[in-house]
Image (cartoon, rainbow, N blue to C red):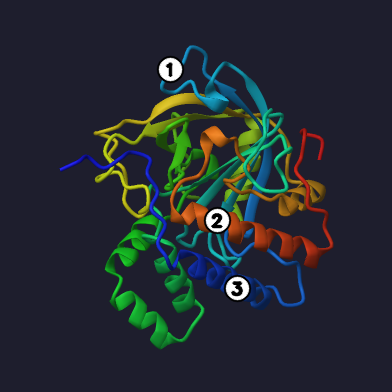
């Protein structure tokens, strides 16, 4: 039997229709959730802060890692947005998935997103769990249909999708500080001709305990305190796909074994000491758009969920900015 090819995508025939349905459902959801107010994101609407950072590529990487952005030592200015995933703005003590979206600036080369090829940004989208909740776009569209539907629709979906329940249950956690969490991409990306997943690992000696009592916005408050006291660092690492069956491209709901293929550091993320909690900076963060398709061809997103993100993220971003009367543009420096 021939060995299955690494980094190989397989597009299901129903994916385009499911993606279009998903975009329409999420658009309807944010209209309903934000009636009469600021049109927020469908996911990760609660921002703890958007902060200035440096992304420092490691020198002397081995040839299999020294590709694209990582081909040589460099330091990029970045904006990092930390957030809660839930589409409803809720207290931080609630169990949730947390997000870390990284936007590098000053990255030369044509990018993949149509109409934005000349932009000088590269984005990495990471969350606080190592698996995506669903298998593919069809299943994710079904999940959103159930969550925005009747109690019966929810019951039917979850009764027939046990792995979705398991992935959700394991990913919904409490955290004390967004800058002391490990984050993963869950979805794969090219690294030249290989496939990888990304992870950001916090460099922290003594993690914060959960506050008691805990205010509604204690995650933002933890960031304010930590960045007033000093810098924060993450190791940014990649995990190479080494087996096409146990490390699938088209199922981000399956974790890739870190025993079979450990994550390997390619860069340092340095969040600078700073005061970030101004109204102007919060508005700037609200208007930023992140998408994994803001990227060099060497780091092209792989798999159905990423293919859907290309369509859905752009549609939601354009709709939000139009409704909010906000210009939609990529930043080029720390001057917001």
Which percent across, then down, holds residue 193? Answer: 43, 32
Sequence order check, earlier mark of 1 and 2: 1
Which percent across, then down, holds residue 329? Answer: 78, 47
Between the residue at mark 1 and the residue at mark 2, the CA separation in whole angstroms equals 30 Å
Which percent across, then down, holds residue 4? Answer: 26, 42
Q: Is residue 212 visible?
A: no
> Quick check: 206 above or below 246?
above
Q: Nearer the viewer, residue 255 or 245?
A: 245
| Residue 197 image-quadrant placement | top left
Secondary structure category for the residue under label 1: loop
Q: Nearer the viewer, residue 160 or 208?
A: 160
- The quadrant in which the N terminus is found is top left
Q: Which mark is residue 129?
A: none
Between the residue at mark 3 and the residue at mark 1, the CA separation in whole angstroms equals 43 Å
Sequence order check, earlier mark of 2 and 3: 3
Which percent across, then down, holds residue 94? Answer: 48, 62
> Quick check: 249 above or below 84?
above
CB under 8 Å between discs 2 and 3: no
Q: Which mark is residue 309?
A: 2
**Circle 2 crowding by C-alpha within 10 Å: few under 14, some 14–19, many from 20:** some
> Quick check: 206 above or below 281?
above
Secondary structure category for the residue under label 2: helix
**Circle 3 crowding by C-alpha within 10 Å: few under 14, some 14–19, many from 20:** some
- The quadrant in which the C terminus is found is top right
Residue placed at 50% from the left, 52% from the top? 306
Q: Which mark is residue 24?
A: 3
Residue placed at 41% from the left, 84% from the top? 153
Mark 1 highlights which residue?
63
Between the residue at mark 2 and the residue at mark 3, the CA separation in whole angstroms equals 13 Å
Q: Is residue 62 left or right of residue 120?
A: left
Residue placed at 64% from the left, 30% from the top? 229
Q: Residue furthest top?
A: 60
């Amino acid at each position: 039997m021939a060995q299955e090819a690494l980094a190989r995508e397989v597009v299901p025939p129903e994916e385009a229709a499911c993606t279009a349905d998903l975009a329409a459902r999420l658009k309807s959801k944010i209209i309903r959730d934000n009636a009469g107010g600021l049109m927020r994101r469908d996911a990760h609407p609660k921002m703890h802060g958007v902060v200035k950072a440096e992304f420092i590529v490691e020198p002397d990487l081995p040839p299999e890692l020294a590709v694209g952005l990582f081909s040589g030592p460099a330091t990029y200015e970045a904006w990092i947005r930390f957030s809660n995933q839930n589409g409803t703005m809720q207290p931080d003590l609630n169990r949730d998935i947390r997000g870390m979206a990284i936007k590098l600036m000053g990255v030369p080369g044509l990018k993949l997103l149509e109409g934005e090829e000349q932009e000088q940004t590269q984005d990495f989208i990471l969350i606080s769990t190592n698996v995506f909740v669903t298998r593919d776009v069809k299943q994710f569209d079904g999940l959103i249909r159930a969550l925005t539907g009747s109690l019966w629709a929810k019951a039917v979906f979850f009764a027939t999708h046990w792995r979705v329940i398991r992935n959700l249950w394991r990913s919904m956690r409490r955290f004390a500080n967004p800058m002391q969490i490990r984050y993963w991409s869950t979805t794969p990306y090219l690294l030249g001709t290989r496939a990888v997943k990304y992870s950001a690992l916090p460099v922290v000696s003594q993690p914060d305990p959960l506050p008691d009592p805990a205010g509604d916005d204690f995650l933002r408050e933890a960031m304010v305190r930590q960045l007033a006291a000093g810098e924060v660092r993450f190791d940014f690492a990649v995990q190479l796909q080494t087996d096409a069956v146990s490390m699938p491209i088209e199922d981000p709901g399956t974790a890739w074994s870190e025993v079979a293929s450990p994550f390997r550091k390619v860069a340092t993320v340095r969040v600078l000491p700073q005061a970030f909690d101004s109204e102007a900076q919060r508005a700037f963060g609200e208007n930023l758009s992140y998408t994994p398709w803001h990227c060099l061809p060497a780091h092209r997103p792989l798999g159905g969920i990423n293919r859907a993100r290309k369509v859905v993220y752009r549609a939601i971003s354009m709709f939000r900015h139009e409704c909010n009367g906000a210009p939609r543009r990529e930043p080029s420096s720390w001057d917001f």
